[in-house]
Image (cartoon, grey):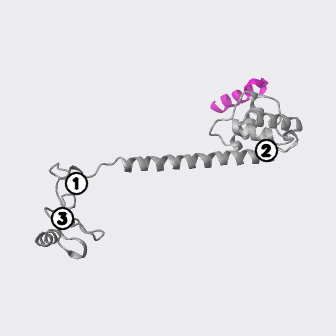
């Protein structure tokens, strides 16, 4: 019984002539992020579905090229219209040129996105505040700005010598053993004795 119903529905669909709705066939625009190849396939499919135009016939090729160029995204359309005698060229040549413009646009987007990410990273690094001690008092660099604290720093790069107290911004491990196994607190005591 189900087979008979399916045959009846199929027969009705095939017997009713398909109406032409040329508005649907010609009233499309390329999407902003739609590739030119996808756009061309969509135009061909709309021609087949909504009109009696065969996109492979010579007349269909002329309409297809016109639709492809005039309804493409703005930057692609400008490039294709600048091509000399674009109506006489093949659809594959126009598609190749459209793909070049589309890929260039994607590369520019990627470059712009990378520049924005670098700018955000620089901004976040410049806005970071120096770390505070556990007790809420400022670290060595902040104490220096306020004129408090330490009077002698080592001239050797990477070694901080503190005369009055240890550097509260250093982790416990760094306070315990400095470069080459030196103890910062011992180093400070020796400097005070000088």
At label 3, counting other C-alpha atoms closer than 10 Å, the crowd grade (few under 14, some 14-19, many 20 or more) is many
Residue 6 image-quadrant placement? top right
Secondary structure type for disc 3: loop
The residues tagged by marks 1 and 3 sit, at their Cα atoms, a distance apart of: 12 Å
The residue at 18%/58% (across/down) is: 168
Residue annotated with mark 3 = 162
Compared to residue 189, the image places residue 100 above or below, namely above
Secondary structure type for disc 1: helix
Q: Earlier in the sequence, mark 1 or mark 3?
A: 1
167 with respect to 21 (left or right):
left
The residues tagged by marks 3 and 2 sit, at their Cα atoms, a distance apart of: 73 Å
Mark identifier at residue 124: none
Query: Which region is colored magenta?
Result: 1-24
The residues tagged by marks 2 and 1 sit, at their Cα atoms, a distance apart of: 68 Å
Compared to residue 68, the image places residue 133 above or below, namely below
Mark identifier at residue 144: 1
At label 2, counting other C-alpha atoms closer than 10 Å, the crowd grade (few under 14, some 14-19, many 20 or more) is many
Q: Earlier in the sequence, mark 2 or mark 1?
A: 2
Position in image of residue 30 (x %, y %): 68, 35
C-beta proximity under 8 Å, tags 3 and 2 = no
Position in image of residue 87 (x %, y %): 86, 39
Q: Quadrant of the N terminus?
A: top right
At label 1, counting other C-alpha atoms closer than 10 Å, the crowd grade (few under 14, some 14-19, many 20 or more) is few
Asked if residue 18 lies in the magenta stretch, the reply is: yes
Q: Earlier in the sequence, mark 3 or mark 2?
A: 2
Position in image of residue 8 (x %, y %): 71, 27
Nearer to the camera, 74 or 192? 192
Residue annotated with mark 2 = 94
Asked if residue 142 lies in the magenta stretch, the reply is: no
C-beta proximity under 8 Å, tags 1 and 3 = no
Q: Quadrant of the C terminus?
A: bottom left
Q: Residue furthest bottom?
A: 180
């Amino acid at each position: 019984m189900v087979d008979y119903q399916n045959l009846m529905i199929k027969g009705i669909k095939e017997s009713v002539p398909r109406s032409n709705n040329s508005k649907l066939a010609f009233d499309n625009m390329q999407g902003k992020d739609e590739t030119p190849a996808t756009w061309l396939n969509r135009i061909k499919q709309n021609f087949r579905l909504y009109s009696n135009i065969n996109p492979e016939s010579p007349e269909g090729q002329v309409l297809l090229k016109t639709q492809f160029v005039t309804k493409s995204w703005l930057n692609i359309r400008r490039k294709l219209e600048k091509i000399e005698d674009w109506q006489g060229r093949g659809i594959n040549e126009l598609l190749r040129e459209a793909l070049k413009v589309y890929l260039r646009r994607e590369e520019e987007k990627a470059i712009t996105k990378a520049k924005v990410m670098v700018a955000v990273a620089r901004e976040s690094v410049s806005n970071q505040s120096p770390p505070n001690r556990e007790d809420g008092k400022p670290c060595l660099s902040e104490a220096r700005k306020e004129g408090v604290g330490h009077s002698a720093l080592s001239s050797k790069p990477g070694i901080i010598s503190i005369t009055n107290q240890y550097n509260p911004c250093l982790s416990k491990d760094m306070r315990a053993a400095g470069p080459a196994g030196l103890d910062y607190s011992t180093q400070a005591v020796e400097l005070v004795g000088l």
